[in-house]
Amino acid sequence: MLAGTGSDVGKSILATALCRIFLQDGYTPAPFKAQNMALNSYATPDGQEIGRAQAVQAEAAGLACHTDMNPLLLKPQSDHTSQVVLNGRPIGNSDAYDLWKRRGKQASSEATPIDFRAEVCAAFDRLAASHNPIVMEGAGSISELNLRSTDIVNLPMARHAGADVILVGDIDRGGIFASVYGSIALQSPEDRSLIKGIIVNKFRGDLRLFDDGRRMLEQLCGVPVLGVVPYVNDIHIEEEDSVALAEKARHAERGKVNIAVVMLRHISNYTDFDALEQDTRVHLYYSNNTDELLKADIIILPGSKSTLSDLYELRRNGAAQAIGQAHRRGATILGICGGYQMMGIEVLDPDHIEGDIDRLPGLGLLPITTTMSGQKITRQARFRLLTGGDNGTDGTLTGYEIHLGSTRPFGNAPQRPFAVLDDGRHDGYVASDRCMGTYLHGVLDNSAFVDRLLAPFAQKLNMAQQHFDYQAFKQQQYDLLADHVRRHVDMERIYQILLDNSE
């Protein structure tokens, strides 16, 4: 288990690296995180929902993702409430008090309370029966004393699994000695004995400057330092924590196709745009500033965990008007999932699935109407793009759906679907080659669609450049990450720790 001194110390990235390393070394690894809190999620092949980080780790391990890798997922809906997804399916909403103090017993509408600890332990046991080693990930800090009695993701989970724990500390934020020593010192003797090593992460500068610090840390904690991993910004792994959004570009640039992702308060699945961030033909940035939106060649309305709330905010802050004005000036508008719903004539919520708003007018860019419903659709999809609503195709592409609500043409508007899925269903709507929407996350990972999206801006493109293969790029990044961690972490010692545990 990779446990942390706090949030965003690099546990997920290091877990991804270990999954790849174990795969390279001939093992059959699998990732596991008992409970995750994230807006970025992913659909498994059998149509269930898990945290995006475990889907990425599974990909690094050469596996199809499964709900047993992340049996409990919390998707924040406000500062106080989250949707609870158990074994891939939503079971209701819970506020923080119910979930943590009452162990989630109010999260389900069923009469029988749910034993989340038993559920996540059962998922681990199923996974461990067919994979070795399991690369576990903790959540946040292991020293939140007020949550210890209800903790199901950190050291209590390690105890169930019989896991060796490696504590990860972030030296970039400062206070590495206090955070590592304090995290270990605050554990019970039983839990302290599980911690077999320390990894100091995100080091900047000459590693030799920390040689003395490494020895001091080992003496202070009585635990070996297994590695000091330098900070890198040229290896690109999809991230799920919203902290990563703070580092994204915010402004347009000259000389490239500028693509603005509208910054929503409840933005979800922003990994949809990772491929575009690596495409050298374009400059991708996030903004709800009206001036910056008007500079964009392409504006993308992303997914949202609260479509009506975000639509209301777009109207309040002027972004909705700016998007319409940009489109009239020639910008392409693409909506994905919740963003697709916002592009229509109206969004209806008669059963108050999302809140107290019954209806809001949409942006009026697509002749569609959406009605929210309580049933969540989650599934992977293979599909063919439809050109202008006819039967022309651009080959078979892949994506996935995670959404509430159903969408249909408004009034007598004609059917002009964006894509046809391999089961014959139609998806999305195309008003023109510069105005379209889809429920399909991952559509921008497909170079055929990205090439089509960029085609109207050929004058800004380097026509000699080939299209960008994002799938090959991701596999290359996993290998680069594994190489980086091998150079700076004592893998021989990690293998010895695993061997000692198995004996």
Image: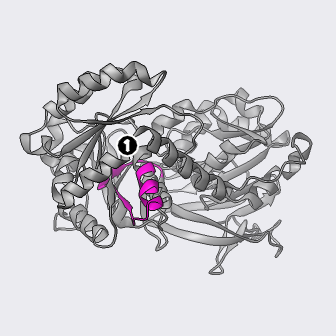
Q: Nearer the viewer, residue 377 or 171?
A: 171
Residue indicated by mark 1: 11
Snapshot quadrant of residue 114: bottom left
Snapshot quadrant of residue 431: bottom right
Q: At which x and y percent is residue 299?
A: 72, 43
Q: Can residue 345 be seen in this view?
A: no
- Residue 412 shown left or right of residue 249 in the figure: right
Chosen colour scheme: one colour
Does the magenta portion include 38? yes
- Residue 104 shown left or right of residue 207 in the figure: left
Element type where label 1 sits in the image: helix
Tally the numbered discs. Answer: 1
Residue at image point 33% right, 73% down: 130
Snapshot quadrant of residue 84: bottom left
- Residue 121 shown left or right of residue 254 in the figure: left
Residue located farthest toward the bottom when viewing the structure as drawn: 423
Does the magenta portion include 369? no
Q: Nearer the viewer, residue 435 or 446?
A: 446
Q: Which of 30 and 321 is in front in this view?
A: 30
Q: At which x and y percent is residue 286?
A: 63, 35
Residue at image point 73% right, 51% down: 365
Packing grade of label 1 (10 A; few <14, some 14-19, many >=20) is many
Q: Which of 203 and 373 is in front in this view?
A: 203
Q: What residue type is labelled 1?
A: Lys
Residue numbers of the magenta segment: 17-40
Q: Is residue 466 above or below residue 394?
A: above
Q: Is residue 22 visible?
A: yes
Q: At which x and y percent is residue 212?
A: 31, 20
Q: At which x and y percent is residue 135?
A: 34, 55
